[in-house]
Image (cartoon, coloured by chain):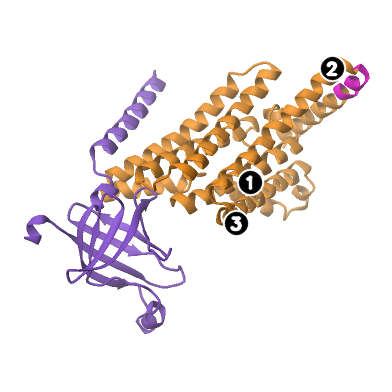
Amino acid sequence: MLKKYSNFRTFSDNVKLGSLTALSAGMVNVISVIVFFAFTSNVTGHFTILAQEITKGNWYQASVVFIWVAIFCFGNFASNYLIIHSSSRISRYLAHAIPVILEIVCLIFVGIYLQHFYKETLEETEILVALMLFAMGLQNGLTASISNSMVKTTHLTGLVTDLSILLSMFTKKEYRENKELVNKARLLMIILISYMAGGIIAGILYYKIQSYTFYAISFVLCIVILYDYSKLRLQKYISRKQPLVRKHYIEEETRELNYNKNILQMHRDY
Amino acid sequence: MKLTYIHIVLAALFIGCGIVIQKSDSPEKLLIGKWEEVACEYERIDKENTNDIYQNLNLHKGEVWQFDNAHKLIFFNKNYLKETLNWNIKGRGHILELHYKDKRLEGYQIQEITKDKLVIHFNIDLQVRGIVKLTFKRITEETNA
C-alpha cells in the first residue's frame, strides 16, 4: 500500500490506500465541522472565505484563514519532501510511513487535548484546526505523491469531475472495454464511497464516544502503516529462511512489474 | 532565483499574518462587554408563516447582553437580570454558541463585529426560509452614566 510508488503501484495498492485514507479524511472533516465549525480536509472553501474576509476588511479572520491554508500546504510540502528524498526499499517504506505517523500524532494530540484540556476558547480552536489541516495536508501530499496523483483522498471536487468525465466516456463502447479506464472509475467510486462512509461513521461515533473518535481515526491510519510493515517483515523472513518460497515471491513480483509496464505502455499509446 | 523570491514572499505573508493576529483584537476579545440589542429583523422571510415557524424559538428581543472574560453571558431585560449562561466562539471567530443551563445549545453566525457594532444571525434549520438578524450597539461606561 505504501512502499510502492508512481507507476509501480497496482490497482489493488491504490484501492487499499485510497479507501482507507479517504475513510479517515471523511471522518476528520466531519468531526472538525461538528467540534470546531471549520472544514479541515479541503481548502477550496477556505480560499473563498479568505477572499470574503479580505473584502470585508476582517484582517484578523483573513490572517487566521491564510495561516490555515499555509499549514495545509506545508503538510503537502513535508510529505513530498520526505518521499523524494528517500532511496532504498526500506527507507522508502519509512519515508512513506512517516507522514502517516505524523498524522496519527496530530490527531491523537487533538483527541487528548479535547478530552482533558479544551476550554473552548477561540485561540485553542484555531490551533487545533491548524493541526488537523496539517494532518490532512500530510495525508493528501502522501497519497497524491506516491500514486502519481491517481489517489487524492481529502477532497472530492476533482474526483467527482474525473468520475463524471469517465462516466460520459463510458457511453462509448470502446471506452467501456478499456480496462484501465474502468479500473480508474472503480477506484474513484471506492474513494467517494469511503469518504462518505467515513463522514457518516464519524458523525455517529462522535455522538456516542465524543473525542474518542480521534482514536478510531488513528486506528484506521495504523492499518495503513501496519499492513505494509507486516508484508515487509514477511518478505524479510522469506528471503532469509525460505529459498523456494522466495523464488515464488520473486516471480510474483516480476509478474506484477510486467503488468505495470504493460499498463504504462497502454497509457502512453492511449 | 525566482524560487527564492517566492519563498521570501510566502514567509513574509506568514509572518505578517502572525503579526496581524497578535496585534489585532480577536472576535472573542471584541465581544467582551455590554451590548444593547437595537434591532431584530427577519430577512428573506415568508411573512405568512412567521408565527408557525418561530413559535418554538427562544428569541431575545430588546435585551442587553453582557459577555465577560470567564465566558459567562448575562441577559438583562429592562435592567433586571433575566438569565445567565455560557458562551464561546468557534470556527475562525464566526460562530457564537450559547450554552443554556438546561443543556440547550443556541448558535449564531457573527456577521459583523467591531468595537461599537455587533450583527449576528440566528442559526436555524435550513428549511426555514428566513434569517433572524440581531443588531447590537456597545454600551460604554459613558453611555451608562
Secondary structure that dominates the magenta span: helix
- Amino acid marked by disc 2: Ser
Packing grade of label 3 (10 A; few <14, some 14-19, many >=20) is: some
Question: CB under 8 Å between callouts 1 and 3?
Answer: no
Residue that carries the numbered disc 3 in the rendered image: A204
Q: Is residue A23 magenta?
A: no
Between the C-alphas of marks 1 and 3, the distance is 14 Å
Residue that carries the numbered disc 1 in the rendered image: A23
- Amino acid marked by disc 3: Ile
Q: Which residues are magenta?
A: A243-250
Tell me if A85 is positioned left or right of B82 in this view.
right
> In the rendering, which numbered label is found on residue B38?
none
Q: Is residue B23 above or below residue B144?
A: above
Name the front one of labels 1 and 3. Answer: 3
- On the image, the x and y values in percent for residue A184 come to 71, 43
- On the image, the x and y values in percent for residue A227 come to 73, 33
